Image (spheres, rainbow, N blue to C red):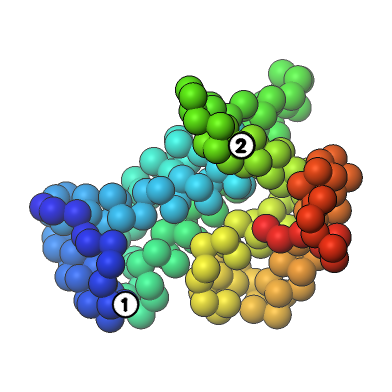
Amino acid sequence: MAALPDKMPASVRLEQEASLVVRARGGDEAAFRPLVERYQARIYNLCLRLLGRRQDAEDAAQDAFLRAWDALARYDESRPFVAWLVEIAVNVCRDRRRAVWWRRVIFGGETPLEQADPAEDADAALSRQETLRRLVAALQDLKPADREALAVFAEDLPAAEAARSLGISANALYVRQTRARARLASLLKERYPELFADDASGEGEW
């Protein structure tokens, strides 16, 4: 089964995805594979924003797709498939955060933020990796609810679907995102003022 093309009209993409889901529900693993390939990078990046560690994000993303496969019979076809995946991934990350909390209670200690892997000899790539590391580190200092609000914001989902993935109203999501963006900008400006050297407003963007 060939991977789904990245460039196609939304209506065509949704039609193809619906067809693949129907086949996958019938036990056709090959039909599920293109859906994984299309969205695995997005789900991994979402998990990285929520968990902060590369290995944790990889494990959570894999778990999210396994859960999606097991839950295909319950998928609501009126929703975009990616929105459903985002909801599953958020829940996986919530479960993993609770597990980490219990490990800390029982065994003590902290889970360090994994350092980014810079490109061997590409200054631009190294700079992007360092910016990502700083962003992920700052995200971990937000409240979990605010971190989730920013994570789904980055997925560029319709507001109603993004809110549904977190189990809250669209208005509540807007309030969380506004609060979280302001707090994140404040943290980044305090820790890394050089990132805001050219920002006259001092607010920054995420």
* Amino acid marked by disc 1: Ala
Quadrant of res 170: bottom right
What residue do we see at 69% from left, 54% from top?
147
Question: Which numbered tag is attached to residue 114?
Answer: none
Image coords of residue 85 (percent x, y): 42, 59
Disc 2 secondary structure class = helix
What residue do we see at 61% from left, 27% from top?
114
What residue do we see at 49% from left, 24% from top?
121
Residue at which label 1 appears = 10
Work out whether residue 101 or residue 192 is closer to the camera in this orientation and state it: 192
Image coords of residue 54 (percent x, y): 53, 33
Image coords of residue 128 (percent x, y): 58, 40
Quadrant of res 103: top right
- Mark yes or no: residue 95 visible: no
Horizontal side of 108 relative to 168 (left or right) equals: right
How dense is the environment of label 1, judged by Cα within 10 Å: few (below 14), some, or many (20 and up)? Answer: few
Q: Is residue 202 above or below residue 118?
A: below
